[in-house]
């Protein structure tokens, strides 16, 4: 059984050192912790690095200075970088270390504190080591030793509860750790030994032992291809918790199967913390452009789905800033599963982004169906934590909706949910596209006879026919399930 935690992550930049005008006040310096204190968050994680430096006055590594323009740049070419540097320095001028300020504030507010290190960049080392410059990256022992020293500083010189190893920052936020898959495979044992050395150092530090967490890729295949034998790390006891994720692929979903990681962690008494991605839409996703944050109902659905799969806790980040009351509310709920059970939920199937496609992460959506592809079954999976039968006296409405591009009324489809036809369920069609209402439509089913089951659900889509003179494909972009609760029975027929 793993340790229960409810985690919030701040990357030190977008909602912290980038935004405040120097000199930094103590109220500004404390804000990342203060804005989530008094909620269910019991663990705060500080993203202490990027590809161009560390966001504290490190002695073991290189402190950020001129960002991506290099330490020898004559000046800052972006206001965010100017603010970042001068905010850190304004604290140092008063004898304050931004990392220690946050650690002390987290402890004052009753939270554990972890420093998170992106592993795939090491600013002042010989450029010949860097994968982006043609080097071998982590195949070089010098790189592994360098990052071990930075982690030693974070875990030993500062009174953190531990460190988080960020293996999942590339390719969305960092270069790859190895130049290619062959090099990664050849160095898998080196990576396993290195992670073990981190575990030994952090677990064996003077005083109370620390903990080691790891951000890893969402699938076992992706990790192994990258040289990361995560199951072996867990088996060896080198890491205490894992967070499956892909940086930059930030779309909320309840269609990711984390069972491979949960099972491995359970065998080692380690923990799995499921990340709640913050966006419903963003610039990397499908038909919609622009960023739209996930709603409370979406975050609640994702949290309960992953907890139901066996996750030991949830891990949130990048909520709308400053964190508003709606954000604080869901952060409070995250620590209380019972409170979330009868809350409205909005489940969203996994959808592709430019980053997920680039690295080969499989998602159920989108599904492109050629006009001539008649009779083929396509499946979309959703994990649902609600027990519709057991809660039938409290559930007011269950709605399944799909967005389909290029659809027309003469198209013929067969939809089934867990093998049961939706032909007798009422369906509403509409468009929410302001700029191009003709482009696609939502098909919204009011489920009164066929209901989703607790656990994994499979929606099957079959194109039965399309007008002979319309030769374009139809594309299923979105599949969502919305469950609304109330205090009074709705008298709906949810008998099995």
Image (spheres, rainbow, N blue to C red):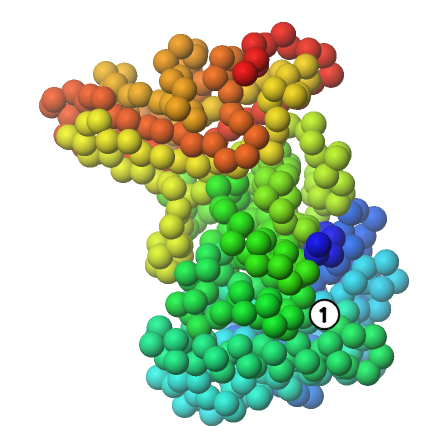
Q: Position of residue 140 (x, y in %)?
A: 46, 88
Q: Classify mark 1: residues with Cα within 10 Å, few (<14), some (14-19) or many (20+).
A: many
Image quarter of residue 151: bottom right
Q: Which residue is mark 1?
A: 211
Which residue is nearer to you in this view: 120 or 239?
Answer: 239
Residue 23 visible in image: no
Q: Quadrant of the C terminus?
A: top right
Q: Residue at x 19, y 22 (%)?
A: 466
x, y percent for residue 362 = 38, 50
- Residue 259 percent across, percent down from the top left: 53, 50
Q: Is residue 78 above or below residue 263?
A: below
Q: Is residue 423 visible?
A: yes
Image location (x, y in percent) of residue 32: 73, 59
Relative to residue 303, is residue 240 depicted above or below? below
Asked whether 126 or 119 is in front, the reply is: 119
Measuring 43% from the left and 67% from the top, which residue is drawn there? 224
Q: Is residue 371 above or below residue 125?
A: above
Question: Farthest residue toward the right?
Answer: 108
Secondary element type, mark 1: strand
């Amino acid at each position: 059984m793993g340790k229960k935690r409810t985690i919030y992550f701040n990357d030190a930049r977008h909602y912290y050192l980038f935004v405040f005008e120097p000199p930094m006040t103590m109220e500004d310096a404390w804000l990342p912790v203060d804005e989530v204190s008094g909620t269910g968050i019991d663990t705060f994680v500080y993203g202490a690095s990027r590809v161009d430096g560390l966001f504290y006055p490190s002695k073991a590594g290189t402190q950020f200075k001129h960002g991506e323009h290099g330490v020898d740049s004559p000046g800052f070419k972006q206001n965010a970088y100017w603010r970042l540097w001068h905010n850190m320095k304004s604290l140092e001028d008063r004898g304050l270390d931004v990392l220690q300020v946050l650690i002390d504030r987290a402890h004052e507010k009753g939270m554990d504190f972890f420093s998170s290190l992106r592993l795939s960049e090491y600013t002042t080392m010989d450029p010949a080591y860097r994968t982006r410059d043609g080097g071998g990256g982590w195949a070089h022992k010098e790189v592994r030793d360098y990052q071990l020293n930075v982690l030693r500083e974070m875990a030993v010189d500062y009174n953190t509860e531990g460190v988080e190893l960020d293996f999942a920052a590339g390719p969305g936020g960092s270069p790859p750790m190895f130049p290619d898959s062959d090099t990664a495979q050849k160095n898998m044992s080196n990576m396993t030994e290195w992670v073990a050395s981190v575990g030994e150092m952090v677990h064996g530090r003077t005083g109370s032992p620390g903990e080691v967490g790891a951000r890893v890729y969402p699938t076992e295949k992706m990790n192994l291809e990258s040289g990361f034998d995560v199951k072996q790390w867990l088996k060896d006891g080198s890491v205490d918790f894992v967070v499956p994720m892909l940086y930059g692929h930030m779309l909320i979903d309840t269609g990711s199967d984390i069972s491979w990681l949960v099972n491995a962690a359970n065998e080692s008494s380690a923990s799995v913390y499921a990340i709640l991605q913050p966006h419903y839409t963003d610039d990397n996703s499908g038909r919609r452009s622009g960023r739209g944050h996930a709603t409370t109902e979406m975050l609640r659905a994702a949290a309960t789905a992953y907890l139901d799969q066996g996750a030991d806790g949830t891990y949130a980040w990048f909520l709308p800033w400053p964190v508003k009351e709606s954000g604080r509310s869901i952060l409070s709920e995250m620590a209380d599963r019972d409170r979330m059970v009868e809350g409205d939920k909005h489940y969203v199937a996994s959808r592709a982004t430019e980053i997920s496609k680039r690295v080969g992460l499989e998602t159920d959506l989108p599904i492109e169906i050629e006009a001539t592809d008649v009779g083929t079954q396509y499946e979309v999976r959703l994990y649902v934590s609600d027990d519709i039968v057991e809660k039938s006296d409290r559930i007011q409405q269950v709605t399944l909706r799909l967005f389909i591009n290029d659809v027309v009324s003469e198209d013929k489809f067969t939809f089934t949910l867990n093998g049961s036809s939706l032909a007798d369920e009422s369906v509403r069609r509409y468009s929410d596209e302001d700029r191009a209402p003709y482009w696609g439509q939502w098909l919204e089913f009011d489920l009164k006879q066929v209901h989703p089951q607790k656990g994994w659900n499979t929606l099957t889509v079959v194109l039965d026919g399309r007008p002979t003179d319309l030769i374009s494909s139809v594309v299923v972009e979105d599949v969502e399930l919305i469950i609304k609760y109330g205090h009074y029975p709705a008298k709906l027929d949810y008998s099995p």
